[in-house]
Image (spheres, rainbow, N blue to C red):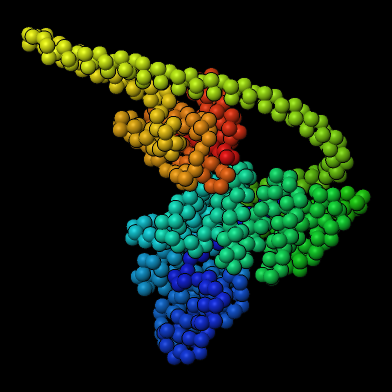
Amino acid sequence: MKRFLFVALILISSASVNAQPESRDSLYQILSASAKDTDRVMLLIQIADTYETNNQDSAIYYLEQSKQLSDILNFKMGLYLYNEKSAIVSFTKGDYNLAMQQSNRALDAARALKDSGLIINMLNNTGIVYQYLGQFDAQLDYSLQALAITERFNKKEKLAAMHHNVANAYLNINQFRKSIDHCLLSLNFHQKTRNYDYVNRLYASLGQGYASLNLSDSALYYYKIAVKESEIRNDKYAEAAIYGYMANTYADRKEFKEMLRVAETSFGLSKELQSNQMLANSLYNIAYASYFNGDNTEAKKHITEALQIATRDSLKDELKNIYSILSYIAARDGDFNTSLWAKKKNDSIQGTLLNEQVIKTTSELERKYESEKKDKQIFLQQVQIQKRTFLNYSLMGSTLTLLVIFLLFYLSYKHKRKLQRQRIKELEKERQLTTVEAVLKGEEQERSRLAKDLHDGLGGMLSGIKYSFQTMKGNLVMTPQNQQTFERSMDMLDSSIKEMRRVAHNMMPESLVRFGLETALKDYCNDINSSGALQISYQSIGLEDYDFEQTMSITIYRIIQELINNILKHASAKTAIVQVTKSDSLLAITVEDDGKGFDPNILDQSKGMGWINIRNRVDFLKGKLDINSQADNGTSVQIEFTI
């Protein structure tokens, strides 16, 4: 199944948007009594804002009125706002070429006005239009320019949106971790400024990042938040798209009943928006889910409707996928002629799309490298070879499709056998976890006992000896040399007491038992910072009022402690970040450093107790562990638990 990746729209506006219907009514009343001056222009633009995401034709109507009056008044700011907001409306309607023309006119107007805020807006918006034109390098370039100017002029109110758009740019070039990092920074700035415009689409971008990393639980968690926020904001365009993302994720999880439910919701919203592209996609998802739910009649009904819409509007990407699933539906009905015809149509569209890409690429090369004739000819020859190779593979694929259909029944039998073997493995895993649990609990109990014995037993004895020595000192007459020896001995005794207390604290931190996980982690990071060996930035969200069960808090503490110990021993790092985030029933831990990095594959052969202990503790809490590291690029460890 093709994954429809609708990246979240975050076009930024210079004026307030998404007003509620009652605010729109009050604007109409003011407009009816207003004079034909610049204030009326701003009123018209505000009214257009209220229609931006739910009725684009009305938005265009009021924007055109604002342009006519701005031309008469020579109101430059009005003309800027007209182009800026017209680009947003054109973008929402899917006319990206027109949106690019309007964005460029608005960017020129912003530079003429010498307004850094407006320049930031249009750099950002132009980057997004490049995204939808498929020019992702240009999108990242414009987004980073906008972020740099925002930071230089310290425009805190814009930082949330800027980081979000940089996140989307990284998502498009498959830099998923960087995308998530910028999404989290964006969310942080939303919370600091208490400005939650477009936060629904931010949550959708977080979901896409986690979905791209195959962390489907996290993806669905953020998609559900995004849907709620979209409903609050009456942002039906985003809501319909998000339900489409959820359908893709449920398909990946093979939860086809849930996929059908969200696809039908997306279909209802798409009908309201009158977006044929979304309608075709949602009908395709309904047919896909119905097919895998065993309802071939419903699958055929919806794929036929999707085919009519996509054919009428020449939606080539959608047609390619529609013909693909149609071939499977027809094969199940025994209609192998239709199945083969649909497969050939799919192959034909793939070839057409490839030709269009070749033409587009060739045109760009001709404009950019007109003088380099020889290189261009070599490039075109390579493209033609790739095209012929692709067509050959397509023909082979058509032949193999029928064989694949007949193999489905055999694969179903193998799948049942696989499920049986998987159940056996799960039982073995449960046995291993029980053993690990006993070992970890025994280890912590022994640590606690040793810490108590050291602190209460040996600590008390050393303190008593110190007190006795101090008492003896007042009753003895010593030579200066003996006095110096006595003082040196007292210093050594003080050092021994401190070292004993440090060892006892490491075995079982008192703050963890008395004050909980949050305080213990802060104290641990502060102790490392005070030692000067490493500078750790500790960040947490949602831990303040949550009372962890003791075994869980000790296990999480040991995992983070072991990760920091590995950084100190092996990474040669200067700084590190520890992030602990709790959202409902999900606890996420991220530990990153700027050290020398390593090849994560060596951990599979590692016999070091550090990584073994970390894996055992993560398995004990039934968590997910993900390690990302490259030479000279530091290390990032991400762990998720359900609590």
Can residue 355 be seen by looking at this rendering?
Answer: no
Q: As displayed, is residue 635 above or below residue 41?
A: above
Residue at position x 76%, y 66% from top? 309
The x and y percentages for residue 233 are 56, 66
Q: Which quarter of the figure has residue 227?
A: bottom right
Residue at position x 49%, y 78% from top? 45
The x and y percentages for residue 154 are 34, 59
Q: As displayed, is residue 492 above or below residue 104?
A: above
Counting every numbered tag in the picture gives 0
Q: Nearer the viewer, residue 565 or 95?
A: 565
Q: Which quarter of the figure has residue 492?
A: top left
Residue at position x 45%, y 36% from top? 517
Horizontal side of residue 25 vs 111, given as left or right: right
Image quadrant for the C terminus? top right
Q: Nearer the viewer, residue 547 or 396?
A: 547
Q: Residue furthest right?
A: 334
Horizontal side of residue 137 vs 155, given as left or right: right
Residue at position x 45%, y 41% from top? 579
Horizontal side of residue 7 vs 460, given as left or right: right
The x and y percentages for residue 319 are 75, 59
Q: As displayed, is residue 559 above or below residue 97?
A: above
The x and y percentages for residue 634 are 44, 35
Q: Nearer the viewer, residue 66 or 250?
A: 250
Can residue 151 be seen by looking at this rendering?
Answer: yes
Q: As displayed, is residue 435 above or below residue 47?
A: above
Horizontal side of residue 69 vs 332, given as left or right: left
